[in-house]
Amino acid sequence: MHVIACYSNKGGVGKTATSVNLAHAIARSGRQVLLCDLDPQGASSYYFRVKPSKRLSETRFFEDSDRFADAIRASDFAGLDILPANRSFRDFDRFLSRIRSKRSRLSKALVAGGAEYDVVVLDCPPNFSLLSENVFRAADRIVVPVPPSTLSERTFEQLVEFFKDQGLPRRKISAFFSMVEGRKSLHRDTMARMRAAYPKRFLAASIPYSADVERMGLRRAPVAEYAPRSKAAACYADLFAELAL
Amino acid sequence: MRFAVGGALRRDFALYDCFDQPLRRSGRVLLRTGRDLVLLSDDSAPVSQKAEPGRGSLPAIAPGAVCDALTGLSPLRALMEHCAGRAETISVAVLDDMEKTCLRMQVITLSTRSGVATLVLMEPMRGYDRAHQRVVDALLDCEGASRGATGLWPVLLPGVQPYQSKPEVPITADEPAHGVAADLIRSSMSVFRQNEAGIIDDVDTEFLHDYRIGLRRIRSVLSLFRDVFPPEETEELQRAFSDLMAPTGRVRDLDVYLLGQSGFLALVPEALHPGLDLLFARMKTERDVAQRALARHLRSARYTARVAALEARLTDPEGLAPGPESERAALPYAQALIWKRYRKVCKLARRIDADTPDDDVHRLRIHCKKLRYLMEFFGPLFPKKKFRKILKPLKGLQDNLGLFNDYSVQQMELGRYLHPDNDAPVATDMAAAVGALLATLSRLQAGERTRVVASFAAFDNRAVRSVFEELFHQPEEARR
C-alpha cells in the first residue's frame, strides 16, 4: 500500500483539487484508492458529493477500526472510495502509524472488497503542526502544489527547512507548480528561480490556472469527468504519470 | 431518492446448465447476454467474463472469472442451452439529494416464448447499505418478486423440474404389487424418454447412460415382479424393451472405453502409449459413426411410433393386465422376493472357492444385481438406516464382481482389435499396446477373482445376516 499526502502549509493553492484529481487518475489506472479527507476546511468529500458522516465527528474515532471502515463511502467512480471529512481527528497520529502496520486492526479494516487499497491519498490540513510531521513520516510521497508567487516561494522554503531540521527525507517531497499563468512574467521568473534552487524537488508537470479547475466546485466531480479534453485534465494526467505511482 | 435511468441495450440471451441442473440445484444461474457471460449466485456476487464462440449454441468458456466459479460440475456432464430469447438491459442509478450515486442496478428483462422475467442485479456501493436495503425491500414487496437468481427458472421455464436419473417412487406397504410395478415402469419410462433429445444432439455421454438405465430398470421390473403380469404379456414387453436397448450397446461400450482412456494408458508402459492412442482414435471414429446411426434411429418414425405405443399402453391404468400375484400387498411381496434372492446369492457364493469355474462367478454377479434392483425398488418400504447397513457390503461385493466381469469383457472386446473382421492389417504399434493391455487386464481379472471369497465374507457376516432376517424373513404363518 502506497500512502500519498497532498500537503501545503499555505491555503488556497489547489491542494484539494490535486487530491481529488490525482485520486481519480490513480483509480482510473485500475488501482483501488482510498481518499481520506483530513482537511476540515477542505472539500474533497464535497467534490465527490459525499456527506460528512455524523458518527465521524466523535473523538477517538480511529481507535475503533470497524467504525472507521463503516465510514468509508464508495465514490461514483470505480476503484475510488472516500473517507469523508471530520471536524476533529484527535487520534490522527495514531491513525497514521497504524495504517502502516500490516497487523493492526485498522489495516485489516482498510480493505476494499476483500483486497487492500493500493493507494491511500491523504488530503491534509494546511497547518504546520505536530500532525504534519506525522504525515511526513507516514507518507511515501508528499505532493506539494506551489503557485509561482513570492509568498509561496517563502512557504516552500520553510517546508524544506522543516524537513532539514527534523531530519526528514527530503526526497519524499514531490512539488509542482500549480495555478500557473504562463502569460505572467512573474510566474515564469519564479518558476525558473525555484527550479534552479530545488532541482530535485520539482516535477516537470504543472497545472495551469484554469476555469475548468474552478468549475469543480460547480460540477462537483473530477476535471477529467466533465472536461476530459481540457488542458487541465491533460496536466493532471501528466502529473499522475510523472509521479509514477 | 431519485432514479436516473440509462438507455436500453437490446441483445439476445441464453440460459445454460447441465441437463440435471446442478447449477440450479446449487443456487446458480449461468446466463449469456450478447457476448457477456455472467454467473449469478443466490449467495454471492455475480461474476462475468466474455463468451467465446463455441460449439453450436453453446459458448466456449475460456479461463476467467466465470470459468473459475463454475465449480462442482461433473466432468461427465456438459452445459447445454435450456432457454433463449431476447434481453433488454437498462442501467439505473439511485441518487440521493446531493445527486450522489448510492446504488447502481441493472434491470434485465428476459423474454422467451414461454415467459418473461425481470432480473434486477444490484451493485451495492460501500457505505450506502441503507439505500440498498430500501430498494431491495421495495422490490421484494412487488408481486411475484423473489430474492436470488434461481427464481428465473420457474418464470422462464414453467413446469421444467430438475431432472432426476433415479426418481424415488413412493410405495406404501399395503399397495397392490401390480400398482408398484406399474409406477416403477412409468417413472423409468419418463427417465429414458427425457434422455432421447440429449442423445440425438450428442450433448454428453450421460444421456445414453441414463437412457439405458431407464430401460434396464423397466426390464428388471418386468422380470423381477414375478407373476404380477400374465407371462405372455411379460414376455412380449421384455422383447419390446430389449429391442429398444439393442441399438444402444455399441455406442455406450465405446463411450466407456473413451472415458476411461487415462486409466487404460496407466496400465501399459509409456513407450506403448502411441499404440493405445491409435486404438482410441479408431474407437472415437467408430463411436461417432455409431452415435450418428443411433441418433438417426431415435429420430426415425418407426422408433417414435413404437415408443409412443408403449408409453400409451403403460401409462393407461388398464393397459397392463393383472397376473396371479397382482393383488398381493407390496410389503410381504417385497420381503418374499428379496429374501428368496438373498438366499440364492448366499447359496451360490458359499460354494465359490479358488477352483470354481468363472461362469459361476458371473452367475453370482447377476443374482447380486437382481438383489440390488429389488432392494432399490422396494427401498421406500424399509428403514433407511438399516438398509444402508446391508447395502454397503453388497455394493462392495458388486464392485468386486463388476470389475471381474469388466476385465473379462474388455479382454474379449479389445482382442477383436487384433483380428479385425475384414482382415485388414493391424498397425504394429497398436498391436503391441493392445497385447500389453490384454496381459495387464488378465492379471487384474485374476486379482479380482481371488478377492471374491473375501468380499463375499464381508457381506456374509452375522450383522448383515441378522438385518436381512429381520427385514425380509417372514414367519411361517405370514407366508402363504
Image (tube, coloured by chain):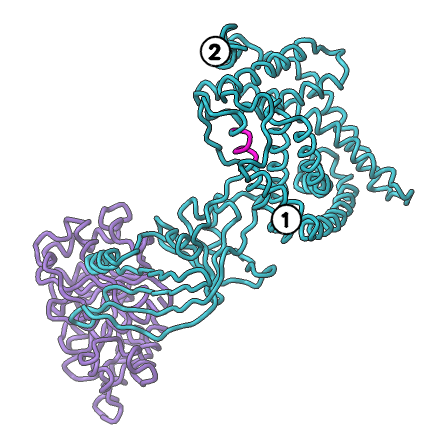
Q: Is residue B225 left or right of residue B137?
A: right
Crowd band around label 2 with a 10 angstrom C-alpha radius: few (<14), some (14–19), many (20+): few
Q: Quadrant of the C terminus of chain B?
A: top right
C-alpha distance separating marks 2 and 1: 43 Å
Residue B62 sits in quarter: bottom right
* Closer to the camera in the image, B274 or B421: B421
Q: Position of residue B446 (x, y in %)?
A: 73, 20
Query: Which colour is chain A painted?
Result: purple
Q: Answer whether residue A160 is visible to the viewer in this image.
A: no
Report the residue marked by disc 2: B470
Q: Is residue B155 magenta?
A: no
Q: Residue at x 15, y 55 (%)?
A: A93
Q: Quadrant of the N terminus of chain B?
A: bottom left
In the rendered view, tell whether residue B128 sits above or below residue B263.
below
Circle 1 chain: B
* Closer to the camera in the image, B352 or A38: B352
The letter of the cyan chain is: B
| Label 1: which secondary element | helix
Mark 1 residue type: Ile
Q: Residue at x 43, y 67 (%)?
A: B87
In the rendered view, tell whether residue B314 sits above or below residue B235.
below
Q: Position of residue A174 (x, y in %)?
A: 28, 71
Q: Which stretch appears magenta?
A: B180-185
Residue at the farthest top position: B476
N-terminal label among 2 and 1: 1
Q: Residue at x 42, y 57 (%)?
A: B156
Residue B128 sits in quarter: bottom left
Report the residue marked by disc 1: B199
